[in-house]
Image (cartoon, rainbow, N blue to C red):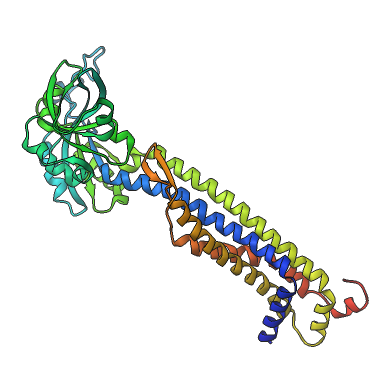
Amino acid sequence: MSRVVFFIAMRQLWDRKLLNGIAVCGVSLGVLTLIAINGIMQGFQHKFIDNILRISPHVTLFDRQLRPAPPLLARAYDGFVVTDVAHQSPSERNLRISRPEEIVRALEDMSEVVAASKLLVGSAVISRGSQQFPVEVRGIEPTRQDRVTPIASYLQVGNYHTLEASPDAVVIGSGIASRIGAHLGEVIVCGSSLGTRLNLKVVGIYESGIPPVDNHRVYVTLRNAQALLGRPDAVGRIEVKLREPDNAQVMSSKFEHMFAYDGESWQETNANFLALFVQQNAIIGFVVGAILAVGGFGVLAIQIMIVLQKTRDIAILRSVGFRRSDILGCFLLQGAIISLAGAAVGDIAGHYVIQMLGKLKSRTEGLVKSEYFLVYEDPRYYYYGFAFALSVGLLASLIPAVRGSRVEPVDVLRGQLG
């Protein structure tokens, strides 16, 4: 009986090629939209996250102590002592990480950690001739830092290792270089708000692909940064690279408990952008779901039309021995075939649309830098397209299929249906 049911289902589909073709196109449009829109949005998101994970640490420990030591009076006396002082003068004595080298070694001994590096970050102004530009100065240990954030791999010109060998070297971003007109080997002046000025030689120009980094960040040795910012022997941050970046939040909490310094994962640092991506994905899901639903209504309308037009034929089938389940299976099979055909066409079209978009030149300089349209082809979405299309097709066919299976031959012959 199953062969006969399959034959009848295919025959009815073939008899209404135009209507069923329209239904297939509706489902295809939904699957195509699912693949294309997700490819576009995922392209930007993957590019941003990939660049962030390469140029930024997975976890950063800052110089703010979570469990500061009790004041000297509290250590000397057991009774009540002064706990707060009004109009206290600010002091930078506590704005540093104590025993940073010990913390770095302890981190590197952990199996979850790839590398760790200490650094000092501050603001300064660099100038070349009459050109001046505010920047973020990062004092680093070049060899260690390159293991955490591989700056050397982003160098366009120059030699990163010269930064460690030369006492007056600086590596600048491509955006900074273009703004002040600096070239490799030239000397620029770097000054801080304290009035300290250093003459530094450009030994490298890097481009990470993230404009906010390329346009504002320069790297010098840790000792030069300490001298420039007036903080001798101070370390303000420790940056950590993990073997599993997705575990950064868990490891950040672990480091806070171990070392009593404020930790921040890369997810927390970029929380605003990641939250925006979640909202975008929710909107995309709503739009794609609506389009797939429209395609489902097309299948529903055609199936209902077939049931109404074929009521007498259904009655004849029932009278010659077809069961309710056979009629139900016939209409569900039609819906499944329409959905699978639509999914196949949509997947193929979606693949070529993504390939075409990926070759379009579209210069982007916002959160990320790219010369081409950002797309990402995720194979999972082709399977999602089939699954969603099949689900929509079966759900849309269920109502007319149940109605058709309930047709009674006697009622049709009496003229009560049809």
Q: Residue at x 32, y 39 (%)?
A: 210
Image quadrant occupied by the N terminus: bottom right
Residue pictured at 49% horizontal, 48% vertical: 281
Query: x, y percentage for residue 242?
Result: 24, 50
Query: Quadrant of residue 197 in the image?
Result: top left
User: Which quadrant would residue 98 be assigned to in this image?
Assistant: top left
Q: Specify whether 318 is left or right of 112.
A: right
18 is higher (above) or lower (below) than 279: below
Q: Is residue 247 left or right of residue 94?
A: right
Q: Quick one: which residue is furthest to the right in this view? A: 414
Q: Position of residue 170 (x, y in %)?
A: 15, 32
Judging depth in this view, the residue of 21 and 196 nearest the camera is 21
The residue nearer to you, when weighing 379 against 172, is 172
Q: Residue furthest top?
A: 87
Residue 370 shown left or right of residue 33 in the figure: left
Q: Position of residue 172 (x, y in %)?
A: 21, 33
Instruction: Check the image and report above or below for 336 versus 109.
Output: below
Residue 249 visible, this angle: no
* Point 19% across, 40% down: residue: 157
